[in-house]
Image: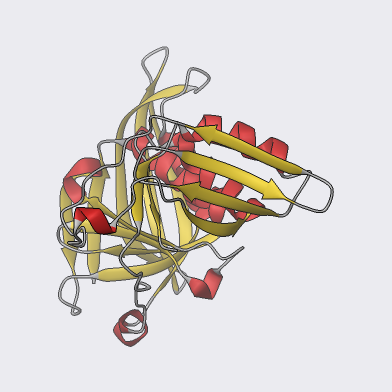
Amino acid sequence: MRFRTSITNVDTFFKIIQSIEKLQKKCIIRFTETNMHIICNHDANEGGIQVWSQIKVDALFTGYRIQSNADNEITIAINSEALLAALKSAASSSTSAYETEEVIVKLAKKNAQAVLTFEINGLTRVGRKVRVSHDVKIEVMRPTDVAKMNEPMCPEPDVHILLPPLQKLRTVVDRMKIMSDVLAVRTNNSGVLRLSINTETVKVDTEWKGCTNPQTQHRREEPEEARDPEELYSVLVSIRSFLKFLNSHVVSTTTIACICQ
């Protein structure tokens, strides 16, 4: 089993793991020949949140080499805090003591412990070469355990809507959390998004109009007259879990919500 690559887009990788770390402290990363999958499944579930993501290798890495007996796939369980700390050392920062020139990641074993080694090469402000190494402990998962991981099947959404900037949503929801533990998310096919709380003592609605309802390739075919574009579809979510999701604004530029009522 071999794995080695150079990270060409350290800042983006750092932001991705930063958002994952805010959701869960342990995640699963599956490396294939073409993609990197970051997974937070029910085994490490915190607040009912799952993550099933897919990132093209070319978007983050160069000199990508992977080899294994499992169809050249390697799946690891890793502490997201430790991974974030390693990437933080390599990410661009005005306060850093050196400027990163190259970041190499490779699979290794030290004292019988599997690790993901980060070798960071850089230059100080006075031109001296610097080499920093981080070993992040990992657990290499067996193919039989990987085969048991199944992405949850979701029904065909009733509506898709392009969300406002997540940071703005977070500001609103953050104010609501002191009044309720449950949030209603309502939207329709006319670009309306409504966040609501309703308790015995307070009722609050915050509404956005003019949001985009994107067309999807797999949208179910239904006669137009059978669908009222003004009909609101709603789901109830934990405010605490929703706030965790909104922390992903550090990496998100476009976010589409799919409501399955």
Of residue 57 and residue 94, the one placed in the foreground of this image is 57
Q: Is residue 238 left or right of residue 215?
A: right
> Can I make out residue 207 in this image?
yes
Residue 99: percent from the left, percent from the top? Answer: 38, 23
Q: How is the image coloured?
A: secondary structure
Of residue 77 and residue 237, the one placed in the foreground of this image is 237
Which residue appears at 33% of the width and 79% of the height? 146
* Residue 15, quarter of the rendered image: top left
Residue 124: percent from the left, percent from the top? Answer: 42, 19
Which residue appears at 36% of the width and 15% of the height? 127
Which residue appears at 53% of the width and 19% of the height? 95
Residue 238: percent from the left, percent from the top? Answer: 63, 57
Please identify the residue farthest to the front as the structure is shown.
225
Q: Is residue 211 left or right of residue 55?
A: right
Which residue appears at 27% of the width and 59% of the height? 226
Question: Measured along the vertical axis of the image, is residue 117 above or below residue 120?
Answer: below
Q: Quadrant of the C terminus?
A: bottom left
Of residue 103 and residue 37, the one placed in the foreground of this image is 37
Residue 257: percent from the left, percent from the top? Answer: 39, 49
Question: Measured along the vertical axis of the image, is residue 145 above or below residue 71?
Answer: below
Please identify the residue farthest to the top as the structure is shown.
126
